[in-house]
Amino acid sequence: MEPIYTLFKSCTAAGWLPSIFEHAFMVRGLLAALIIGPLLGAVGTVVVTKKLSFFTQTIGNAAMSGVALGLLFGEPADSTYAGLYGFCLIVALLMTFVKNRTSLANDTIIGVVLAQTLGLGIILMIVVTNQFNIHQVEGILFGSLITLTDNDLIVLAITALAAGLLFTCTFNQFMLSSFNKTLAKARGLSPVFLEYFFVVLMTAVVVASLKLIGSLLVLVLIVVPAAGAQLISSNLRRFVWLSMLFSTVSTVLGLLLSGILPVPSGAVIAVVSSLLFYAALLLRPLLAKGGPNQGEI
Amino acid sequence: MIAAVQPNLLEVTDLSVTLRGNRILEQISLAVKKGHIHALTGPNGAGKTTLMRSVMGGMPHQGTIRFLFRDSCRLGYVPQFLEFDHSVPITVFDFLFLMLKRVPVFLGRRRAMRERITAILAATNCAHLIDRCVGQLSGGEFRRVLLAQALEPKPELLLLDEPASNIDEVGIRQFEEMLISLRDQHGITILMVSHSLDMISRVADRVTAINRSIFYDGSPDGLTHFDLQQQYKILG
């Protein structure tokens, strides 16, 4: 990573970039933002279509327990990935399993699991904080540029590459299955398999993004850009690209602001993302011609 | 009408479906002949859609379902309802693209696909709807789009679940002409659920009436409104 940091320093010295990029953590943050921004934006379009918005929040909540479990099992404090991925995947698969095996509504299942993971997370955090710095947990909750390491960036890049590739290859199937399961089945697809597959993929992306955005705010970056894009899109192509654009602008701008202001990166990203959503809402009558969400506010 | 000497394309034997302890279908046996329009009718809750779903392989059942395909070995399906979020910006073009291509719709080459999809939609007289959002279509328009997707690639057996619901009288007549053309011009066998005896008598070669089990199976001329009303009373 050193050559990249040196390059950014040179650019800063030449006046091509703001002075905040003299710091390695800001460069890491920018790279992370450029990786996860488009990915979360694209994944968000399927999340919104499948109505899985609060599912992602449950994964975020499960992350608290995941971090605590990782620490309890002796993982290093700055990379509790086994605990995080392990617990979040179990929770995601459990929710999908219960949904497919019962007639309970999706939001009911999410409510049940959300309460469980929150309760368990708080208990485990109390146990763990006796032997661990609370700021690390804070970083998981709200995201922190400072705690983002080179290793985190590598995990993020590998996850994003794999998830991005798989997502691109299966986007049409995800969308068709989200649109209507019976029709997808008639086309030879397996909606149940696709649901499990998407949930695993989404969980991997969410967990990899936690260091930058935080578990409490990860929902924002998955749902808000897609919701804003949906308001002013008249077709799927525009929906996906606009969602990716909104998400990337939110992460990069939010990151730059958090480098200047003494606030967590996740919080600023959430505010920027929300501002873009409201801008889309205001511009909807002009931009949504032919789309399903056109009309006056 | 097609002569009744055609070979069977679909054979359902002793089909029973039980869901959460409730018997939905009981010992259903029927045969759909190649090149026929075969109608399924019966009161609401009689198990018609369950029978369709069983044929599609989407319902656990007892008994056997046998396809005797010779050509494309493909099923086309037009569902009764298509529940979806009307606010999602999916155009008719996108909708068909999702089904026909593996390349993601946001990366695909649209010009070549546009010509292909226009031709597919033209088969059911709805090419003009290509850029409309699916959530903005009327019931009749959406039925035609659904039928167009079911015909690509050409199916050997087309399953239609209440194809005439939400369509006005003029639209129904156009739809019937389309079905007859699919059977006579393209040799497509059709199994359709319908509540309309008038429509059945105009287009179907054979009708099977069910109310959990079969209470009539034969020519559309032999089934009367009275027969159906008797079954509604039993159910009611």
Image: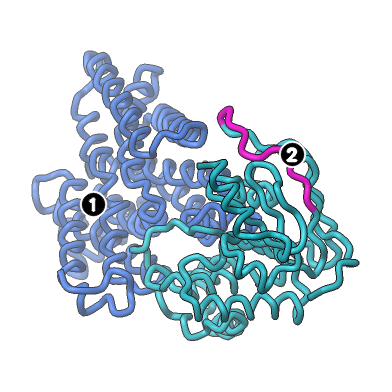
Chain colours: A blue, B cyan
Q: Quadrant of residue A106?
A: top left
| Residue B86 vs residue A171, the one in the foreground | B86
Q: Quadrant of residue A218?
A: top left
Question: Farthest residue toward the left?
Answer: A261
Residue A145 inside the magenta-drawn segment: no
Q: Identity of the amino acid at label 2? A: Gln
Q: Residue at 65%, 60% (x, y): give it.
A: B224
Q: In this picture, is B174 found above or below A211?
A: below
Q: Which residue lies furthest to the front in this view?
A: B226
Q: Could you tell me which residue is drawn at 48 percent across and 86 percent down?
A: B128
Q: Name the residue under label 2.
A: B27
Q: In which quarter of the image is the C terminus of chain A?
A: bottom left
Element under disc 1: helix
> Which residue does the image show at 21% across and 72% down from the upper left?
A284
Parent chain of label 2: B
Which residue in the structure is indicated by mark 1? A26
